[in-house]
Image (cartoon, grey):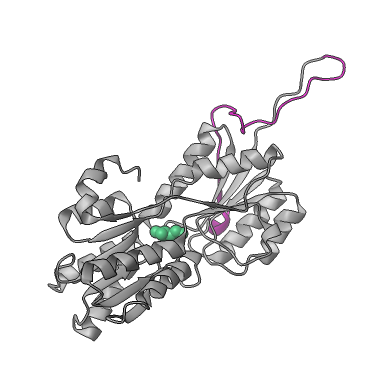
């Protein structure tokens, strides 16, 4: 089977509330036919970050808990693979599709195909630009607000004086666009803060490190803060700063979004200054939505997650209870 279109079917143990269609009693009072297991296709972006692995784990675990058969397709970071997976799910006649879209555009045709087939699509963690009737609901954090929160923290910590390097997420992805927009909107109100360089690290640790190394070489350390659009790039940047003797967390402030355990450990170690949460545990709300849709209940077009910002002074107390 082709590597890029490989679908892994994970069969749950029993049938939960969502897991099986109810079998109606027969007109003659005979035994009802066996219930059919509900089948959901999940098109995941890939495994670019710790956050992504946590989201995949949450959706797989929730499917199993509810007795749903989950068809998992790893897009390996490529939109073409995700489009192919959606087309395959439609051809297989799944009951619903969960899609974490790598970028925001180019989804009209596959989503319209799912709609024509009567298959509801639940978008998770990233928005798409398409006719809203092409999907059932979007479950995500408020990425614009996350960028704003980090900018407000920076202004407060520095008294409004900083030279910032911004490590952006995947080009064309909803969170990269929104986290940049929110951050720059608030930074524009602080005349003493400039954004020296802004470059994509693709949400990956190694790429974040390499991009940071290049910026350190080019700018000779002439910056005082790094804003990374996710934990992985922040952790990569911290390594690069350490190797260049630029003491992250002290000489250079480092700010991040996601809030995974590694980021909290870095805050406890003193190399990361603050982190804005982005909850990856989207399995429960995604399957709640599918359950509601299948029951004919109204589902909001947009379901927002509640997140908060942590300063490193709060990290030690918060670390033991971090769920991802
Ligand atoms: O879409 C959510 C973002 O994607 C997370 O912040 C990042 O870590 C991931 O790769």
Residue 144 percent coordinates (x, y): 45, 65
When the figure is inspected, residue 71 is found, relative to residue 227, above or below; the finding is above
Residue 83 percent coordinates (x, y): 62, 61
For image coordinates 81% across by 15% down, the residue present is 30
Kindly indicate the quadrant of the structure image that contains residue 82. bottom right
When the figure is inspected, residue 287 is found, relative to residue 251, above or below; the finding is above
Kindly indicate the quadrant of the structure image that contains residue 95. top right
When the figure is inspected, residue 306 is found, relative to residue 185, above or below; the finding is above
Q: Is residue 121 left or right of residue 192?
A: right
Is the magenta region chiefly helix, strand or loop? loop
Residue 299 visible to an observer of this rendering: yes
Residue 239 percent coordinates (x, y): 21, 66
Residue 170 visible to an observer of this rendering: no
For image coordinates 50% across by 66% down, the residue present is 174
Residue 76 percent coordinates (x, y): 48, 60
Ligand 1 lies in quarter: bottom left
Extreme-top residue of the structure: 29
Q: Is residue 131 left or right of residue 138?
A: right
Q: Is residue 288 left or right of residue 216?
A: right
When the figure is inspected, residue 131 is found, relative to residue 71, above or below; the finding is below
In magenta segment, residue 161: no
For image coordinates 71% across by 55% down, the residue present is 114
For image coordinates 26% across by 75% down, the residue present is 160
Span highlighted in magenta in the image? 1-29
């Amino acid at each position: 089977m082709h590597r890029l279109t490989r679908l892994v079917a994970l069969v749950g143990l029993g049938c939960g509330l969502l897991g099986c269609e109810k079998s109606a009693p027969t007109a003659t009072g005979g035994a009802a036919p066996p219930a059919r297991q509900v089948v959901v296709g999940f098109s995941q972006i890939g495994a670019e970050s710790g956050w992504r692995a946590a989201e995949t784990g949450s959706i797989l675990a929730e499917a199993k808990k509810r007795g749903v058969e989950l068809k998992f397709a790893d897009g390996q970071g490529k939109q073409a693979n995700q489009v192919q997976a959606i087309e395959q799910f439609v051809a297989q006649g799944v009951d619903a599709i969960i899609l974490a879209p790598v970028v925001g555009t180019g989804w009209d045709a596959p989503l319209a195909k799912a709609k024509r087939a009567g298959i509801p699509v639940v978008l998770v963690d990233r928005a798409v630009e398409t006719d809203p009737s092409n999907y059932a609901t979007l479950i995500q954090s408020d990425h614009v607000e996350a960028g704003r929160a980090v900018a407000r923290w920076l202004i407060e910590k520095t008294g409004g004086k900083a030279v910032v390097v911004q490590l952006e997420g995947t080009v064309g992805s909803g969170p990269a666009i929104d986290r940049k927009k929110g951050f720059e909107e608030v930074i524009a109100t602080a005349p003493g803060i400039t954004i020296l360089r802004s470059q994509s690290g693709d949400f990956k640790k190694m790429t974040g490190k390499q991009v940071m190394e290049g910026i350190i070489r080019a700018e000779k350390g002439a910056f005082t803060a790094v804003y990374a659009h996710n934990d992985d790039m922040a952790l990569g940047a911290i390594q690069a700063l350490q190797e260049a003797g630029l003491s992250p967390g002290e000489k250079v402030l480092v700010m991040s979004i996601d809030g995974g355990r590694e980021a909290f450990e870095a805050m406890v170690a003193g190399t990361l200054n603050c982190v804005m949460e982005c909850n990856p545990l989207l399995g429960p709300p995604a399957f709640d939505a599918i359950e509601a849709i299948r029951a004919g209940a109204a589902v909001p077009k947009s379901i927002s997650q509640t997140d908060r910002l942590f300063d490193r002074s709060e990290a030690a107390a918060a670390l033991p209870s971090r769920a991802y």
